[in-house]
Image: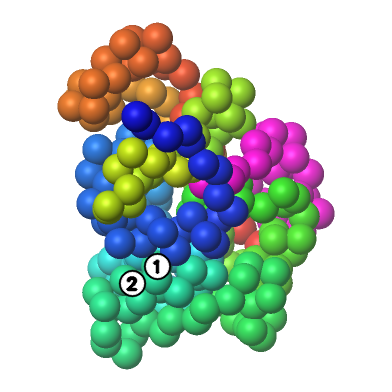
Amino acid sequence: MRLGMQILKSEKAYDLWAETYDESKDNAVLAAEEHAASPLIRRVAAGLTNAVDFGCGTGRHIPDLLDAGVRSVVAIDQSYPMLMRARSKFPHGAVSFVRCRLLSLPIRPGSFDLGLACLVLGHEPSLSGPLKTISSALKPGGHLVISELHPDFEKRGWKRTFSVRGTLRQNYAVENFAHQEEEYQAAFKENALDVRASEIPKVDESLKPIFDRTGMTDVYQQFQGAPLLLVYLLRKK
């Protein structure tokens, strides 16, 4: 008998998910996020000196930064197992790893040319405090790339779910807070962040093979064209 889904706070969830996170090849959210965010990160990062990845996880976007020529990356995450997975992939000195919570960053203000906050802010109940911390870390004129679940994601009852080896009958979900686009706009304004570009990736044909492989073709057909993510490029004043 399959057990019910257990919703976990983000730190506990990612501690459990770390072992299999990089095996999530049939994850529509990650596929759509990387399709939208990776080219944007590479374009903005070209020629920059340094960058900080807030909530780096296992380091999905660190190659985007390094391949674009960024010479120094600080990768931050609250989950020790996720951070260790990332460290094992990038042992060279160009990447430094820091374990801490988003609201307690040990970073001098005005330090970075570029910041990433990819699938991070949805774990925070409020946007104001986290964006104040993130904005403070950027140099004037620095850029920030944000990706997050579209607020309609939660309205549909969707969750970021996973299972753990040895507990296949137990499904877990990461606690997430739906922030409306108006909340983002207000928090950007409050923290001196100008929107330079934005995108709303949708459930489209590029994701259909994932839905088919996971036996969710009916879900794809029902929600084709529905908004899936919010992606922002911002510049600090």
Q: Is residue 127 above or below residue 116?
A: above
Residue range of the region highlighted in magenta in the rendering: 174-196
In which quadrant of the rendered image does the N terminus lie? top left
Furthest residue toward right:
190
Instruction: Give the residue displayed 70% in from the left and 61% down from the top.
Output: 130
Q: Is residue 194 above or below residue 134?
A: above
Q: Is residue 179 shown in magenta?
A: yes
Q: Is residue 217 above or below residue 94?
A: above
State the SS at label 2.
Answer: helix
Instruction: Give the residue displayed 41% in from the left and 59% down from the top.
Output: 16
Picture quadrant where residue 202 is located: top left
Q: Is residue 216 visible?
A: yes
Q: Which residue is mark 1?
A: 82
- Real-space CA distance between mark 2 and mark 1, rounded to the nearest whole angstrom: 6 Å
Drawn side of residue 123 relative to residue 52, left or right: right
Where residue 33 appears, as percent x and y from the top left, is 39, 43
